[in-house]
Image: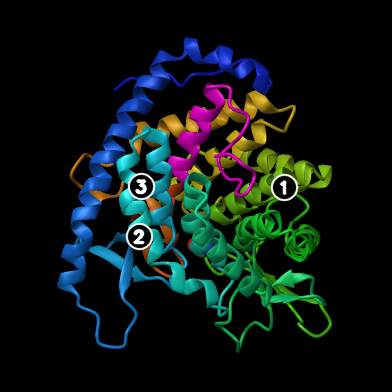
Amino acid sequence: MTFRPFLCPLIGLTLLAGCQTTKPAASSVMRATLKLAETQAALLLREIPVAQARKPVAAGKAPLVSPRTVDGQGNLVLVASRDWTSGFWPGYLWLLAEATGHDKWQVPARQYTALIEPEKTNATTHDMGFKVYCSFGTGYRYTQDPAYKEVLLTSARTLSTRFNPVVGAIRSWDHHQDVWGFPVIIDNMLNLELLFAATRLSGDSSFYKIAVQHANTTLKNHFRPDFSTYHVVDYNPTTGAVVTRTTHQGAAPESAWARGQAWALYGYTLMYRETRDPRYLAQAERVAGYLLNHPNLPADGVPYWDFDAPAIPNEPRDASAGALIASALYELSTYSPQAAIYRQQADKTLASLARDYTAPAGTNGGFLLLHSTGSKPGNSEIDVPLSYADYYFMEALLRQQHLATGRTVVAGRVGAGGK
Ligand code: GLY
């Protein structure tokens, strides 16, 4: 298939509607991709009960509710709601409903969203945003269901208990307590969306204040002079001092783990969306500059799993990082004078993912994208489908649609009266 990504030369949302009529190639590829996404989602819906029957859960154990990936034998891997990835499948179904305009996807979206509700009181991890915002938050944008609002508010209260005012951050992990006293990972920036939504939905500004403090602490301590980010910063929980800067999923403490850079880009873009503080916009632009000008970023825009991986170009890619970067760049393009550059890059990456990283229909366990990497150092999920790659890919597609139709609301904001 030959496909020339559409490059919109215009800057500014008011002009974006005019681009739409001149991009038939992009539209037809993306229409075909959405059709494939529906075929794959239908397959995944059939495969989930088969996988559940193959591996029954022992009495008293948490049920396996969401698909995460496929294993080496090609079997679907399901996770319990407590897994950090559990919210992506229901969230993906909500996004698919909007992107296709087919309400039928809301039925399984509701069904799988409900299975994540136990997490609203789980205070043992920072992953609340991934689990609950991506499922209930995305669902709330469509349904305005007051029951969903209650889940979001309870979840935000639970997440807030992990905030330490001395450190000025939300604690990420409770594991590795022999190594880290108060680890904060760059991924944690994504959980802040839930807190902003909670303030909008409740009028309680304490959530907003926690989010801003967390982002400011991360801005101060996570970034290197070249604006790449560390994965993990460990703090002394009593004094707030930085103890160590390192990695968990990257190639080395000083390397630039690709998904971590993507979380940083997405995180500071959403911080600007929510606060309009120009320091956050500047940071998002600097991270974008680091990524887009990096000599190890492949021409198709989909990064290797780490920008400093030792054997580039013979290293696995991470399609999840590519999807995240594309989605974040679409949103950043609506705030920045660099709009044309960011949209061009996002269009290119999305087109690459659609053309070269989608699975043939009926394969890949029902996931849409191939070639993501979960944790190379952990020898886990290397060159596989991942539920969050599909989620951010669909979000990027939706954002591209929003921009092409001149809509000013970019998917992501809950409690603001729009999708
Ligand atoms: N938040 C975990 C990861 O990005 O792998």
Q: Element type at marker 2?
A: helix
Residue assigned mark 3: 106
In the rendered structure, the answer to whether residue 409 lies left or right of residue 110 reads: right
| Quadrant assignment for the N terminus | top left
Looking at marks 2 and 3 on the same chain, the residue that comes earlier in the sequence is marked by: 3
Check disc 1 and report its element: helix, strand or loop.
helix
Q: Position of residue 198 (x, y in %)?
A: 66, 59
Q: CA distance from mark 3 to mark 1?
A: 27 Å
Q: Earlier in the sequence, mark 1 or mark 2?
A: 2
Q: Which residue is mark 2?
A: 112
Q: Nearer the viewer, mark 1 or mark 2?
A: 2
Three-letter code for the amino acid on which mark 3 is drawn: Gln
Q: Which residue is mark 1?
A: 274
The residue depicted at 20 percent of the width and 47 percent of the height is 363
Residue at x 48%, y 41% (from the top left corner)? 395
- Image height of 289 relative to 194, above or below: above
Q: Position of residue 119 (x, y in %)?
A: 48, 72
Verify whether residue 116 appears in magenta: no
> Badge 3 local density, few (<14 within 10 Å), some, or many (20+)?
many
Image coordinates of residue 153 in percent, x first then y, are: 61, 65
Q: For this rendering, which residue is in front, 92 or 155?
A: 155
